[in-house]
Image: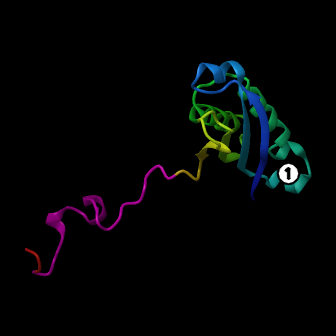
Amino acid sequence: MIAKIGLSDVRFHAPHGFYEEEQLMGNEFSIDVEVEADVVLAAATDDLAGTVSYATIYYLLQAEMKKPTQLLEALAYRIGNRIMEQFDSVTAVTLRLSKLHPPLGGRVGAAFVEVSLGNQLNLHPQQTFEDPTEEDFGAADDLNFGGFGR
């Protein structure tokens, strides 16, 4: 049985950003994280050891947010990887990292990056009919067009 387990709007003040001022003064960040995990053991035994502890996820977020990083993409990916490595039962992580009120010179609520790691990634996009390969239909010489097109 697969369950989604997560935390939303986890807030940190942290020294992330491209500009030196951001690294010195820090920014406010919000994190939404959702993991997919096999929780059959937890459901059957009512034992925390059989699931993904959201308290542990929080501590992982907290630890990673303390490490200064220039790019949100790098930070979000690092956090997602850390969660995947921490729990054997996790098959996927989706994480949205938002920098609240980014220093852009105007009124902006947040800038964000969302990353997805694990089984929901489509690393080999399906081809469309417009771009078939020989693997899809065999070599052109093997095709029998019934007298049409040759």
Q: Report the span colored magenta.
A: 122-147
Q: Main secondary structure of the magenta part?
A: loop
User: Per the image, is 31 magenta?
Assistant: no
The quadrant where residue 60 appears: top right
- At 83% from the left edge and 51% from the top edge, which residue is drawn? 41
Query: Which amino acid is tagged 1?
Result: Ala
Q: Residue furthest front?
A: 106
Q: Is residue 45 above or below residue 149?
A: above
- At 73% from the left edge and 46% from the top edge, which residue is drawn? 32
**Image location of residue 52, percent across then percent down:** 80, 44
Q: Which residue is mark 1?
A: 42
In the image, 134: left or right of 144?
A: right
**Image location of residue 144, percent across then percent down:** 16, 75
Q: Is residue 41 above or below residue 136?
A: above
User: Per the image, is 132 magenta?
Assistant: yes
In the image, 28: left or right of 92?
A: right
- At 82% from the left edge and 47% from the top edge, which residue is drawn? 51
* Label 1: few (<14), some (14–19) or many (≥20) C-alpha neighbours in 10 Å: some
Q: Return the residue nearer the eye: 120 or 63.
A: 63
